[in-house]
């Protein structure tokens, strides 16, 4: 008999890949998602979907016990958070703290938080280790930092163990083709480059070619979304001994131009693109040190190669030109 897990935001991009991994491993999963960004079709039939905001999670939490809670539900656009910071503080930080408190009251012992590399602003040292200075690059990153702090108090006062997993750039799609990336609006580099290559949208804007990197474009650590999911399973046993924080990436970076080249190689089409000004708030280089996670759990990414990542994203996109087909 598997364990019983609650996943907020489980109909979203990263959350749905975790739900699939949990169901595949024989666990029982309940998803809470308001479906404003998530997709009903991204939740497998074997999971139970409760269409609700996390503010209304109390009855679901009361229907425990839960072996762990995974909290993905959030607004997640860096640029949008710069334009509307208090929407992010309310939706991510305030609502998330209410949810963390409700979990503690209902006796949850293990809580896994989707956190972000946007905690590190412009980091002094690459690759970025867990003890790098926290200097959130946006209200979005700040809202996640607030939840990391709230979890530290939930452990100290209630003994609810927390895992803060700071994702670098989630990318790719379920290799079995069941799930993929479908944001509205789409702002992420890899799906935009794929759609440009497939002629589904205009040229890709390359945001800045004057960064202090070898080819002048920004470098990011793209990590396959199913490797992110497997890391969640790997950290769970650690929570029986205490709370943990991990940076979650491959430990290798790729530039925007390297991503374009990978998309061209995988799709066989040129990626039409134009040079555009820098996007506000983009640091030149964000690459994770995954050393702590590897040492603590033995986790290793199965699909670390950029071409493999792009290939899974491109094949899902080719099979689902309209994504999940509307909300
Ligand atoms: N980029 C372009 N053109 C585009 C879109 C992106 O050149 O049309 C560039 C960006 O400037 C950046 C890189 O491609 O250098 C990656 O951009 P994404 O928007 O795909 O991803 P970000 O690195 O901005 O942000 C992602 C998540 C955030 C998270 C962050 C952590 O979306 O939620 O990683 O590093 F906080």
Image (cartoon, grey):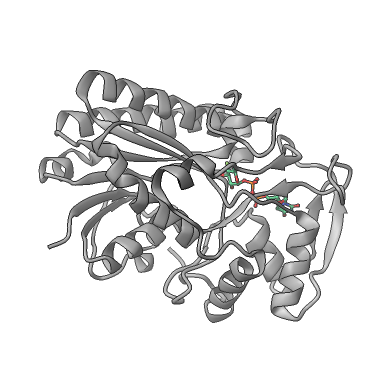
Q: Is residue 276 above or below residue 11?
A: above
Residue 36 is left or right of residue 66, and the answer is right
Estimate the x, y position of residue 188 in percent, counting from the top left. 63, 55
Q: Is residue 201 visible?
A: no
In the rendered view, does 79 fall on the left or right side of 149?
right
**Residue 222, position in %: x, y?**
62, 54
* Residue 203, placed above or below residue 152: below
Quarter holding residue 61: top left
Residue at 46% across / 69% down in the picture?
174
Q: Nearer the viewer, residue 99 or 243?
A: 243
Identify the residue shown where x is 82% and y is 68%.
Answer: 272
Q: Toward which corner of the image does residue 205 lie, by quadrant?
A: bottom right
In the image, 26 versus 203, the foreground residue is 26
> Relative to residue 285, is residue 39 depicted above or below?
below
The x, y position of residue 295, in whole percent, is 46, 44
Pick the residue in front: 189 or 212.
212
Instruction: Tell whether 183 sits left or right of 23.
Output: right
- Can residue 161 be seen in the rendering of this structure? yes
User: Which quadrant is home to the N terminus?
Assistant: bottom left
Question: How many marks do you count on the picture?
Answer: 0
Residue positioned 58% across, 61% down in the render: 304
Indicate the quadrant containing the C terminus: top left, top right, bottom left or bottom right: bottom left
Q: Nearer the viewer, residue 253 or 200?
A: 253
User: Residue at the location (77% across, 46% down)?
Assistant: 218
Q: Position of residue 40 (x, y in %)?
A: 35, 64
């Amino acid at each position: 008999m598997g364990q019983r897990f609650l996943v907020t935001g489980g109909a979203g991009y990263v959350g749905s890949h975790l739900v699939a991994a949990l169901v595949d491993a024989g666990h029982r999963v309940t998803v809470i998602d308001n479906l404003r960004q998530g997709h009903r079709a991204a939740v497998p039939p074997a999971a139970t979907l409760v269409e609700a905001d996390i503010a209304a999670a109390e009855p679901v939490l009361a229907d425990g016990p839960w072996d762990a809670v995974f909290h993905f539900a959030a607004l997640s656009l860096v640029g949008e958070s710069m334009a509307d910071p208090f929407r992010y503080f309310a939706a991510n930080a305030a609502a998330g703290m209410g949810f963390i408190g409700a979990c503690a009251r209902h006796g949850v012992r293990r809580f896994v938080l989707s956190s972000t590399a946007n905690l590190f602003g412009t980091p002094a040292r690459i690759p970025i280790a867990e003890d790098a200075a926290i200097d959130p690059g946006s209200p979005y990153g700040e809202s996640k930092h607030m939840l990391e702090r709230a979890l530290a108090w939930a452990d100290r006062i209630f003994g609810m163990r927390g895992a803060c997993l700071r994702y670098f750039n989630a990318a790719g799609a379920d290799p079995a083709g069941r799930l993929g990336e479908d944001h509205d609006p789409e702002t992420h580099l890899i799906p935009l480059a794929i759609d440009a290559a497939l002629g589904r949208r205009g040229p890709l804007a390359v945001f800045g070619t004057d960064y202090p990197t070898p080819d002048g474009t920004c470098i990011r650590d793209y990590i396959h979304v199913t490797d992110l999911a497997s890391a969640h399973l790997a950290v769970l046993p650690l929570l029986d001994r205490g709370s943990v924080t991990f940076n979650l990436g491959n430990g290798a970076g790729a530039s925007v131009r390297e991503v374009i080249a990978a998309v061209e190689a995988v799709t066989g089409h040129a990626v039409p693109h134009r040079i555009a000004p820098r996007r506000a708030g983009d640091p030149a280089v964000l690459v994770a040190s995954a050393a702590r996670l590897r040492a603590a759990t033995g986790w290793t990414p199965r699909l670390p190669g950029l071409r493999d990542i792009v290939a899974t994203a491109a094949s899902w996109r080719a099979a689902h030109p309209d994504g999940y087909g509307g909300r």
